[in-house]
Image: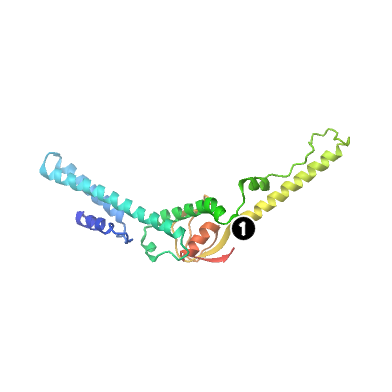
Amino acid sequence: MDRNELKSILREENSSALRSLPNGFYRLVDDYIHELEEEIRKINNPRSAESKILEDELQSAINDVETIFIRRVRKVTSRATSNAFSSSSPRQDLDKLLPAEQAVYEATLSAIQVARNGLLEPILDPSSSITPAKAQEDTEPEVSSQKVTGEPTATGSVQGASASAIDTNDGVRDKVEIAKRNINEEYFVVRILKDLPTFNAVDKRNYTTHAEDVVVLPAMNANVLVKRGAAHLITK
């Protein structure tokens, strides 16, 4: 890596197109910057013309690589935003991303889709959503109107309170079973079609997958991978 090559990459990043970076681009830039710093130390005269030239080149290299990074991140997040609201397959230039950039794309896309499902979908399709009040009712166990204190009830028996406690426990178990079924419905089984970088899914877990792996993923992330052509849906 040298000044001319770095400037050339910077000019290419001015366009909206995604381009492949040289293999080990950031490592090469890091080596280049360290070489400049070492040359400046060897001169050991900050007032010399040669030292000032190297200082200018060093600062320029730092500014250029930072600008390249910012421009590429903007392109990545822009494509994630566009694909989150598109029914068509993502453009093939996504394969030009570095692994770390692919992780940014996946995280941004997942975050947008989670926000869409939580904020926009209840408005666009009210029948498929549950209001907060309703959700709270569904998750709270049914409690008998009688207090289970072991004291006589209005009928004068402790047995009524015991029966109420049994009914309440049954209600709690029913709610737990329903919750388990809901969790199962939120995960899909997919077959991975190509090696993917480690990504953080909507269930806050990290997943590292390789081609031909059969994995269980959150429905949100599974749909994203299928849409990108990176996975094949086996079962919902």
Residue at coordinates 46% horizontally, 62% vertically from top-left?
A: 86
Q: Nearer the viewer, residue 75 or 95?
A: 75
Residue furthest out toward the top: 151
Instruction: Judge whether residue 186 can be spotted in this image.
Output: yes
Residue that carries the numbered disc 1 in the rendered image: 185
Which corner quadrant holds the C terminus? bottom right
Q: Quadrant of residue 43?
A: top left
Which corner quadrant holds the N terminus? bottom left
Drawn side of residue 34 relative to residue 90, left or right: left
Q: Nearer the viewer, residue 145 or 186?
A: 145
Q: Quadrant of residue 21?
A: bottom left
Please, what is the three-letter code of the amino acid marked with disc 1? Glu
Relative image position of residue 159 (x, y in whole percent): 86, 39
Relative image position of residue 173 (x, y in whole percent): 72, 48
Q: Residues within 10 Å of mark 1 (few under 14, many from 20)?
A: few
Relative image position of residue 8 (x, y in whole percent): 23, 58
Q: Secondary structure at mark 1?
A: helix
Relative image position of residue 23 (x, y in whole percent): 31, 60
Instruction: Judge whether residue 218 can be spotted in this image.
Output: no
Q: Compared with residue 173, is residue 235 higher up or lower down, i.e. above or below?
A: below
Q: Nearer the viewer, residue 184 or 193?
A: 184
Q: Count of labels shown? A: 1
Q: Nearer the viewer, residue 2 or 38?
A: 2
